[in-house]
Amino acid sequence: MAEISAFKAMPPVGIDPIGASNEGASLYERIREDIIEGRLAANERLVVTDLARRHGTSTNPVREALQLLRGEGFVTFVANRGARVRPIDQDFVRDIYEIGVLIEPALTRWFVNMATGEDIAELERLQGLIEENNFADTFRHSELDTAFHTVMYQRHYNRHAAELWWKHREVLRAVSRRFSFTLARRAAIMREHRELIALVKAGNADEAAELISRHVEGSGRHVLEQMRARNAARAG
């Protein structure tokens, strides 16, 4: 299984996936995971010296990590009160995916008008790997799926939009790791990817943009539904 999971998606060229020193990046990932998994509770105060002691490091990498987490919305800073864990609730997830619904159709429309034969071949190659994996390894699926969408956005002239897409996708990927794909969502992903490739081949930018809007909204709603189900199970 380790061999299957070896594939790692990379951000669009020119976009730093982390933006910190190696130590700061490592801490960022560990603290983010603690927030997502609830080991750091919602609204818990994040004291730099305490985190440095816990992770056996100096305070500078901790500050780097907290600034990155602030940029993604996982951490909030309040004047004279320091950093606190932002609740990873349904409102947070809704806000993130709704931004994707707004910007990804525009990115997709541009891509369809600029797509080359090589781009289409790469989409088909990645989709073939996605179907070959068939959700057996959810980590590999996530990486391949991200690589699939990166093909469409990596050359867009608006680097701010591409970077915003990447950062928000990474947030949703981190949150969605807590949940399994339903059979219905699995089928929708496969079908919509194939439909998208066909629309790119046909040069139908408007329909491709409409499809990607439904695709992103479907992913966001799926995560929300899983969150509601988990909360209901805990409450019951």
Image (cartoon, rainbow, N blue to C red):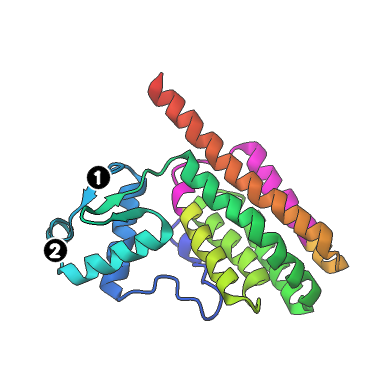
Query: Which residue is situated farthest in the top direction here?
Result: 236
Nearer the observer, disc 1 or disc 2? Answer: 1
Q: Is residue 46 left or right of residue 85?
A: left
Q: Is residue 177 magenta?
A: yes
Q: Which residue is mark 2?
A: 56
Question: Furthest residue to the front?
Answer: 79
Q: Amino acid at mark 2?
A: Gly
Q: Secondary structure at mark 1?
A: loop
Q: Which residue lies at the image location 77% right of the left edge and 77% below the top edge?
A: 114
Q: In terms of depth relative to the viewer, which is nearer, 216 or 158? A: 158
Q: Residues within 10 Å of mark 2 (few under 14, many from 20)?
A: few
Residue at 45% over, 25% down: 232
Q: Residue at x 29, y 58 (%)?
A: 30
User: Quick check: can you spot residue 4?
Assistant: no
Q: Hey, what amino acid is under mark 1?
A: Glu
Disc 1 crowd rating (10 Å Cα; few below 14, some 14-19, many 20+) is some
> Where in the figure is residue 66, as x and y percent of width and height?
29, 62
Residue 110 appears in which quarter of the rendering?
Answer: bottom right
Residue 102, given in percent of the width and then of the height, sits at: 65, 56
Q: Secondary structure at mark 2?
A: loop
Residue identifier under label 1: 44
x 21%, y 56%: residue: 80
- The secondary structure making up most of the magenta span is helix
- Judged left or right of residue 48, residue 85 is right
Q: What segment is highlighted magenta in the picture?
A: 174-196
Q: Quadrant of the N terminus?
A: bottom left
* Disc nearer the start of the sequence (1/2): 1
